[in-house]
């Protein structure tokens, strides 16, 4: 059992991997066969892979929880979007690994899982985030059952997190947004053309932050007033980012309002003054997309300047829907099913998600019901 360095560079992989390990393992007939691993970029990677391989071979169940977790995430990167796996990794590093890092996986029982659940619940996480962590931990144990011979999954036996039914949630706590008047107050204090256009874009499209940052000028068609949404940017660590498909893997087109189109044309006219301008440039950031830290810094600065309580970038998305609901009601429309059908494609959400999130913003539905009762 040893680590080898492939000296013949013609046998290296295209991305430069050349370290590997060799050892023996029994086949299905119990006969020892020589096993040669795939190649790795670094010697340390090959060493860790060998260690995991030997543990699986020699003692599959008595393994450190953290090592099995590493193996689980390594496989997850081959089957899931990188952006999804990194969000899982972040939750794992912050709230799962610190508790279980001293355990061997076969020593973790239902009581251990229950104790962990009690610990993380003290952080006042949302029920949605708690069950996201539950799914990650469940996935690690499922992986151990499949690959390490673990006999049962104590996470499943313990069960999902449950929210108390007696919790009172006010409508204003479900989602936060700014009104049209508040947006006008906010946008009026912005004197930088790029930031004014950026925040106008968020408010009048309701697009996700990553989708906006990934846009290039090729995605905007001023002839038919459409914006092609076919990619997003996700951040691994700080400003280390990649471009991938949209959240739900579906492309869509968004129609621009006259206000947004006029603002974009003014902004593009200035951008095109650069000698190296290209339609392949990002709409916001030119040759390099904007950093999230810069976005939050300027957002908070302008909200403070406007004398308003700041909202998150995602809450511009809520603000867009709220704006359209108000205008829909003002126009005399009351068919909520029709509204959510139209909005689901624009927002890149299912109709059910749209209804669950925004239905309470339709107060006139109750008014019509009361009118019927008053006629009795």
Image (cartoon, helix red, strand yellow):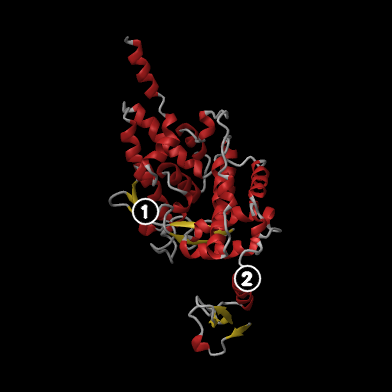
- In which quadrant will I find the C terminus? top left
Which circle marks residue 55 in the picture? 2
Residue at 35 percent across and 27 percent down: it is 330
Along the horizontal axis of the image, is 84 left or right of 324? right
Question: Which image quadrant for residue 220?
Answer: bottom left
Indicate the quadrant containing the N terminus: top left, top right, bottom left or bottom right.
bottom right
Q: Disc 1, disc 2: CB below 8 Å? A: no
Q: Which numbered circle lies on residue 250?
A: 1
* Residue depicted at 57% across the width and 40% down the height: 126
Residue 67 drawn at (x, y percent):
63, 65
Task: State which quadrant residue 34 falls in.
Answer: bottom right
Residue located farthest toward the front when viewing the structure as drawn: 29
**Residue 152: percent from the left, percent from the top?**
57, 55
Residue 374 lies, in percent from the top left, at 35, 11
Q: Extreme right residue here?
A: 102
Front residue of this view, candidates 331 and 52: 52
Looking at this view, is 163 or 275 the one in front? 163
Q: Earlier in the sequence, mark 1 or mark 2?
A: 2
- Disc 2 secondary structure class: helix
Q: Secondary structure at mark 1?
A: loop
Q: Which mark is residue 145?
A: none
Q: Residues within 10 Å of mark 2 (few under 14, many from 20)?
A: some
Q: Residue at x 59, y 85 (%)?
A: 5
Residue 367 makes an appearance in the image? yes
Residue 21 visible within the image:
no
């Amino acid at each position: 059992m040893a680590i080898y360095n492939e000296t013949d560079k013609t046998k290296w992989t295209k991305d430069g991997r050349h370290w590997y390990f060799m050892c023996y393992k029994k086949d299905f007939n119990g006969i020892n066969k020589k096993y040669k691993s795939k190649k790795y970029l670094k010697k340390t990677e090959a060493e860790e892979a060998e260690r995991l391989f030997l543990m699986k071979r020699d003692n599959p169940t008595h393994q450190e929880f953290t090592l099995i977790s590493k193996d689980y995430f390594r496989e997850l990167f081959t089957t899931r979007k990188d952006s999804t796996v990194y969000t899982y990794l972040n939750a794992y590093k912050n709230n799962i690994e610190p508790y279980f890092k001293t355990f061997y996986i076969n020593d973790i029982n239902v009581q251990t899982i229950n104790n962990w659940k009690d610990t993380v619940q003290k952080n006042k996480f949302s029920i949605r985030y708690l069950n996201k962590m539950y799914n990650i931990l469940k996935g690690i144990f499922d992986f151990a059952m499949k690959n390490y011979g673990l006999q049962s999954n104590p996470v499943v036996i313990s069960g999902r997190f449950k929210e108390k039914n007696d919790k009172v949630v006010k409508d204003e706590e479900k989602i936060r947004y700014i009104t049209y008047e508040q947006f006008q107050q906010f946008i009026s204090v912005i004197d930088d053309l790029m930031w004014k256009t950026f925040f106008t874009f968020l408010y009048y499209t309701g697009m996700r932050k990553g989708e906006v940052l990934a846009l290039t000028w090729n995605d905007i068609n001023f002839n038919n007033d459409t914006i092609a949404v076919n990619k997003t940017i996700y951040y691994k660590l700080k400003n280390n980012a990649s471009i991938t498909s949209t959240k739900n893997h579906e492309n869509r087109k968004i129609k621009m309002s006259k206000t947004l189109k006029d603002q974009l044309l003014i902004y593009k006219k200035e951008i095109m003054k650069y000698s190296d301008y290209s339609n392949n440039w990002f709409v916001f950031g030119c040759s390099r997309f904007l950093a999230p830290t810069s976005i939050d810094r300027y957002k908070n600065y302008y909200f403070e300047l406007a004398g308003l309580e700041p909202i998150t970038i995602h809450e511009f998305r809520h603000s867009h829907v709220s704006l359209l609901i108000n205008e829909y009601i003002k126009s005399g429309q009351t068919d909520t099913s029709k509204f959510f059908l139209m909005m689901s494609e624009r927002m890149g959400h299912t109709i059910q998600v749209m209804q669950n999130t925004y239905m309470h913003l339709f107060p006139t539905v109750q008014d019509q019901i009361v009118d019927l009762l008053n006629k009795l």
